[in-house]
Amino acid sequence: MRVSLFVTCLADQIWPSAAIGAVRVLRRVGCSVEFDERQTCCGQPAFNTGYRPEARTLAQRFIEIFEGSGTDAIVSPSGSCTAMVHHYHDLLEDAAWRARANAVAERTYELSTFLVNRLGVEDVGASFAGRLTWHDACHGLRDLGLKSEPRRLLRHVRGAELIELPNAESCCGFGGTFSVKHPEISVAMLDEKVEAIEAAGVDAVVSGDSCLMQIGGRLSRRGSSVRALHLADVLASTA
Amino acid sequence: MTDAARHQILRSIRANLAASAPSAPAAPVPRPPSQREQDADLVSRFTTQLEAVGAQWTLVRGEVEAARALRRILADAGAKRVAGSDAPLVARLLTERLVDLSRDELFTCDAGVTTAQWGIAETGTLVLESVRERSRLASLVPPVHVAVLSTACIVASLGDALARLDVTSHAITLITGPSRTSDIELTLVVGVHGPQMVHVLLLEEA
Amino acid sequence: MTFEAGARAALSDAQLRGALRHATTLFAEKRRAAMATAPDWEGARDRARAIKDETLLHLDRYLDQFTASAERAGARMHWARDAGEACAIIGWIAEQRGARTIVKSKSMATEEIHLNAALARRGIEPIETDLGEYIIQLAGETPSHIVAPAIHKTKGQIAALFAEKLGIAPSDDAAALTAAARQALRRRFAEADIGISGVNFAVAETGTILILENEGNARLTTSLPRTHIALMGIEKVIPRFADLEVFLQLLPRSGTGQVLTAYQSLLTGVKRHPDDEGPDELHIVLLDNGRSRMLAAPVTRQTLACIRCGACLNACPVYRQIGGHAYGAVYAGPIGAILTPQLIGIERAAHLPYASSLCGACRDVCPVKIDIPAVLLHLRAEVVAQHAGKRRVFERLAFRAYAAVMARPRLYERVMRLARALHITPPLRAWTKWRDLRPLAPRSFREEWRRGLKKEGTG
């Protein structure tokens, strides 16, 4: 199966291990992976903050780049960026653009849904010793219906023990620009999440989105030994 | 006076609807799942629900038993001044009930006795229709409300009850248990402005 | 007080945060338990939303039908374009009737038009009879939640309030406090000339208004006084009497976790016979106040489907932290964030659509499936397009620069390489005050790809 990687600008620059891990895992399960270097950003930050013309420009660019990929699927390590692509029809009023947007969105998957639902794979040959817990990032959970897929993948990781957080589905307070527009509220929400993570006695909290920056940033500020890992970091691990 | 307002509001509604993108007509309202009325255990479902919502009940057969039970219920509640609705049945069951009370007198009553036109099994609800009986205040002001309900008038669901209601009533009241509030720290307190005790006297025809 | 200041005050109020955590957690549990008792919860949501959509698409027709039916049954109808007009109408009726005592049951619409203040200016202030509203009226505050107005107050605070205002001994027993309120209000019900209520649903087919409650104060308010005035937003109308069933399945469960509230009053006009019980006259005031404008687009129109259950407040992780007063508006929480800018104008409420992390928990619990995040995003776009609210010079420049850079991949790479080389970190004090900022990775993904990851998979 030919896959085109939708790296996301955040993974590209700040968390490349998530994208590198995604590439390795996809290859391990038999996909060939291409990377179109013209890609930059899907436009989500602009869209979420109300800057639609800017978001529209980037959306159209994304569609132009990926519609010609000729691959079976476009796979991304980020739930929210994948959800953004699925919402392009909200941004484009022109009927022709909408059709093109929908055609691309149909082929665009978040990593765990691609593995579990499209490929039917739950065991990707990963090994990772430690107690893990999964944080349900909001867009993945509520826009894409991502719930069981990451958990099924993590349960097959040799040496890993998956603990369920009591408030796994609660928002961590990131919300993109919300985290800096309303930092005190963001951190109040974050601390409820972080306290639950610390109480769970895990070695790492795992998720599939930019939330990891928020959660990881607070954990390290609090001097916690709990690490924040991307799903692909764990799945690519053969340690 | 408000005619100009009426015209302007309606005009605004029409203009704004017209401005909205030519949307498809609203999807037809999906039909609710059909419910077959199960007569068999309506009474027991009703009484189970009454208990769940904090109401009490007594099942009697015939008016003689009903009158006795009513007197006992009122005595147990320590009710001396009892207001009655204008239902002939209430007059027969409790000859010493008080009627034609002024507002202030009503506020001094210990209990109110009325009938109910319907009972709803799925929720333990009593339905009072003003066109059939003057029971609005006797079922509301005194701290105890006793409602006499014929078991033949218990229907299965809220929908069944709505279908049977006589909308020429200017006031239809649905009563589910005693009055209550959780406004203080979400702590449940039973008995606020409406009655703090509801007792349903279920009457099976003799 | 600005939203930021309100939020900050709320976050530093330990008692409030405890009360909010307790209330929202409990409300969510009760709602979940109640949902499980519904025969077909998702089907009911779909049906209710379909009924609302049908009604809103023909709102003028259904309002006309409702008016005709209600008038036939003896109600007097009034139309109010805005809050001021509604207050004037109600004030005029009160003055005409020479009202000395007015009792009021809970109605968010009356809060929206600031009715109590308007009537107070005429020398008659209505007495709130719903326990939560009564508490905040005594405290001189506004409601902080759509369904439980005094949820921000602890039992201790209420006890102290009652001790001060009612002269009772302080008690930490909720039942004793409730009994004190009941006692204080009893006489007011008995002597009231006018009762003012809201309306939960208005049936076009029959002219019936439906009022839900638990305490019995709405029944007393609408049956004892000689005059009953009911205020309703124009979006409260539904087509058929039978439609009430699905809304009665959804609202109590979503709002308070009950299968049914203790009382539903279905009132159709006035009594037919002078000896019947109830008011001599019923005035229904239909309120627009910005609602008709929301009909103009499908994305905003759904705001009018709201049945005021408050479930979105209970589910919202932001509301859970800051409570209702921080929103600085009559309607708080997620529904408040979308309704308020549309009622009072985006210029005065430009910050509210941003008081959300867009998590979507509200959409999950809304009984009529309002896509609140979609409306928030729409309003954010409006704020930016209309330059509403505070000037965001830096932000606008930043996004324009971002779009320009992201549209040019080679420029993007060059900018990021430069930032990396110069160890540039954005001065995001708003982030770094509480959280460590993850730095740019030493090598970006695309650099790794070129350096060997691309070929790794082959050969």
Image (spheres, grey):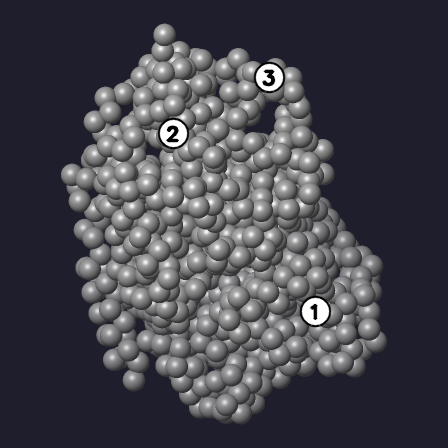
Q: Circle 1: is it few (<14), some (14-19), or many (20+) Cα within 10 Å?
A: many
Give the amino acid at mark 2.
Glu
Chain hosting mark 2: C
| Element marked by disc 3 | loop
Q: Nearer the viewer, mark 2 or mark 1?
A: 2
Looking at this view, is B4 or B84 the one in front?
B4
Horizontal and vertical percent position of residue A120: 43, 15
Instruction: Establish if C195 lies above or below A28.
Output: below
Looking at this view, is C409 or A132 the one in front?
C409
| Element marked by disc 1 | loop
Is residue A32 at least partly visible in the picture?
A: yes
Horizontal and vertical percent position of residue C251: 51, 52
Give the amino acid at mark 3.
Ala
Residue lying at 74% horizontally and 65% vertically, measured from the top left: C155
Q: Are marks 2 and 3 on the same chain?
A: no
Residue that label 2 marks: C447
Residue that label 1 marks: B142
Give the amino acid at mark 1.
Pro
Residue that label 3 marks: A239
Chain hosting mark 3: A
